[in-house]
Image (spheres, rainbow, N blue to C red):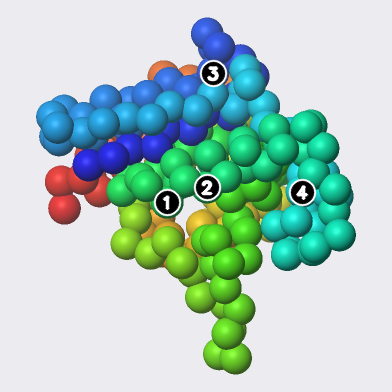
Amino acid sequence: MKILHIDSSPFINDSVSRELSAMIVTELCSRHPDASVTYRDLGTTPPPHLSAGAMSLLHNAQDVAITPELQVELDGIYQSIEELIACDVLVMGAPMYNHSIPSNLKAWLDQVCQRGKTFRYTPQGVVGLIPGKTAFVASSRGGIYSTPETLPHDFQEPYLVSILELMGVADCHIIRAEGVSRQAIGREKGLAEGRETLLQILNN
């Protein structure tokens, strides 16, 4: 088993999403001792937002001059795509920021979600090119966004499920710790609920 472990929180010591994603990877490795883990920390080393030159070249433009700076950007994009294609399991630490995801995680997704690389257009619609993978999204939220009243404000989990499905990753599990900033719930209870969800999925 090849695991690609992504963290995106800029916080190192007090990040719930980091703790949750680490919990998932630890549990997976305990069940699969031969697993290998590739780790990418988008929180401390954020990827660049796609430049016009990179976007043009990725869309097969022929008239873009490849500068040294653009080559570095392209090399990083291709490495990220290769890591995603190579993995069997994707573990993604994804905190909610302002009802959505951190911009560094969005930048990484913009890099790896590329036509002809991870999805393609057909007359029947979009077809994902990296099927057969399992994804675990370590979702953390300070408030509660899973109720009928608050669900319309959640542009975090639905977006991640949608963009992964676009690339063919349909087996996606949300491991959620929410309400971690609320006194009645808090960090420990939120993490415990996330762990319970994870064990239910892995034991079934």
Amino acid type of disc 3? Ser
* Mark found first going from the N terminus, 1 or 3: 3
Q: CA distance from mark 3 to mark 2?
A: 26 Å
Q: CA distance from mark 1 to mark 3?
A: 27 Å
* Mark found first going from the N terminus, 3 or 2: 3
Q: CA distance from mark 1 to mark 2?
A: 6 Å
Q: Decide: few, some or many residues near mark 4? Use Cα within 10 Å; few <14, some 14-19, many ≥20.
A: many
Q: Residue 104's x, y, as percent?
A: 68, 33
Marker disc for residue 15: 3
* Mark found first going from the N terminus, 2 or 4: 4
Q: Nearer the viewer, mark 1 or mark 4?
A: 4
* Mark found first going from the N terminus, 1 or 4: 4
Amino acid type of disc 4? Ala
Q: Is residue 192 visible?
A: no
Q: Decide: few, some or many residues near mark 2? Use Cα within 10 Å; few <14, some 14-19, many ≥20.
A: some
Q: Residue 2's x, y, as percent?
A: 28, 40
- 141 relative to 145, above or below: above
Q: Residue 56's x, y, as percent?
A: 80, 57
Marker disc for residue 81: 2
Residue at horizontal 21 percent and vertical 33 percent from the top: 35
Q: SS of the residue at dot 2?
A: helix
Q: Residue 86's x, y, as percent?
A: 37, 47
| In the foreground, 63 or 100 | 63
Question: Horizontal placement of 52 versus 105: left or right?
Answer: right
